[in-house]
Image (cartoon, grey):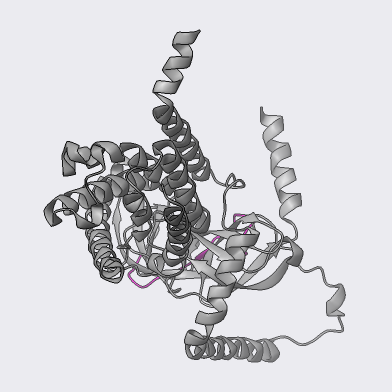
Amino acid sequence: MQQIIYFFIRNKNFLLFAVLFIISVALTVQTHNYHNNKFISSANFVTGGVYTFRNNITDYLSLGKENQQLLEENLVLRKKLDQFKETVVFEKLDSTVLPNKYKYFTARIINNNYTKTKNQLTLDKGRKDSLKIDLGVISSKGIVGIVSDVSENYSTVQSILNTKSRINAKLKKSSHFGSLIWNTKDPNVVQLVDIPRLASLEKGDTIVTGGRSTIFPEGIPIGAVKDFHLDNDDNYYYVNVDLFNDMTSLEHVYLIENNDAQEIKELEKGVEDEEQ
Amino acid sequence: MKSNDIVINIVRFVVLVFLQVLLLNNINLGGYINPYLYIYFILMFPLDGNKGLLIFLSFLLGLSIDIFEDSGGVHAAACAFIAYIRPVVLKYSFGVSYEYNSVKIKKADPMERLTYIASMVFMHHFVMFSLEIFSINHILLLLKSTFFSGIFTIILIVFTMILFNKKAS
């Protein structure tokens, strides 16, 4: 017994170190699993507060650019509205009772990183503003990521610049679809894999979201084809995609909630259960 | 450890965490190079201070950075590691004399001091980046990040030391 106690006293520093090291490695591994970063995340009161404080100061520096972006977006929306007016004869429909499939929210990014291999963003809105896990996040130019954790006032977003991200995307012109991943090399270039060899690809082709997931609606712009080559077994293309978004300077984003997500997921789960 | 030391170290802890998360983490030189000045706290912790306490405080220091960075526990692990290994590095860089309290980090020979800083910084960065990247496919990225960020951190730590040394004397 005495031996054991002496052993502990003699090695107390090593034991303390070992325990703390194991805890931190466990925390690290935990964040490598999607959706499990509940325990330690920047969506909490203290860090959220500090980041909001910083953003209140730095926001002024980018006002000019933000205005420019809003103007551009207004222009695009205005054009779309005009087309809509020309082509659609308005029927008497009360738009408030139309079932809206998607609900939109806005939020401000208070922390953004893009230099790591698993990048996260922090937003200044949370559960109180009815945000939930798994909402899609886009900016006026293209997609940004998916909400991964929500606290009362803040939320964290798993950026598309994250090796864990896999987002369904397709070619706009031919609807061949694949998965969007990131090879960590460049914050403005992501990779589209699993595009079948049959697809005719050209430099500059537009890539949009595929609509096969319950998170993003179909047709949200992502980027343009930069270059492409066949992968090792020659059956699929490996495409480098230039993002429309500048992931290094984001300020305001939109969040998309799919009202049918729950229903679709339950239905798919039911089918899977039957198969088993 | 004197009461003066306790106050200095508490202030240093808080200031370094805020400096790191608000300013230094956003430098992103060349896309991925950031200095991690906050380990200055571990380097300058009093030599006669309790070793167990240092390991625990370093863990807390790393964890604070991790919470801000959403990086799980990579900084906490790296900090706990260099805090544990610090006595070995001290002996290796300053010789055995440090054990008799005859060495002051700020007054030591510049070469010895640089050896100490560089070994601690590179070990910290290596552990941190290996945990963060967590994949053998990206080994080149790991070495590149460790090397360049390490050099940046060392330069910053040396400057910080010179700055506060002048003030003290």
Q: Nearer the viewer, residue A117 or A245?
A: A117
Q: Is residue A94 above or below residue B149?
A: below
The answer to whether residue B46 shows anywhere in this view is yes
Q: Residue at x 47, y 41 (%)?
A: B56
In this rendered view, identify the residue nearer to me: B169 or A129: B169
Which stretch appears magenta?
Answer: A201-217
- Mark yes or no: residue A219 visible: no
| Residue A120 in picture, x, y percent from top left | 50, 59
Looking at the rendering, which quadrant does residue A67 occupy? bottom right
Q: What type of secondary structure mainly makes up the magenta span? A: loop
User: Farthest residue in the top direction?
Assistant: A1
Q: Position of residue A239 (x, y in %)?
A: 35, 59
Q: Is residue A159 left or right of residue B113?
A: right
- Give the residue drawn at x 37%, y 44%: B78
What residue is drawn where x is 60% and y is 45%?
A39
In percent of width and height, residue A91 lies at 83, 84
Q: Is residue A12 above or below residue A251?
A: above
Q: Which quadrant of the figure has residue A233? A: top left
Q: Is residue A182 above or below residue B103?
A: below
In depth, the one of A196 and B115 nearer the eye is B115
Determine whether A273 is above or below A99 in the image.
above
A204 magenta-colored: yes
In this orientation, which residue lies closer to the viewer: A169 or A133? A133
* Quadrant (top left, top right, bottom left, bottom right) of the C terminus of chain B: bottom left
Asked whether A136 falls inside the magenta stretch, the response is no
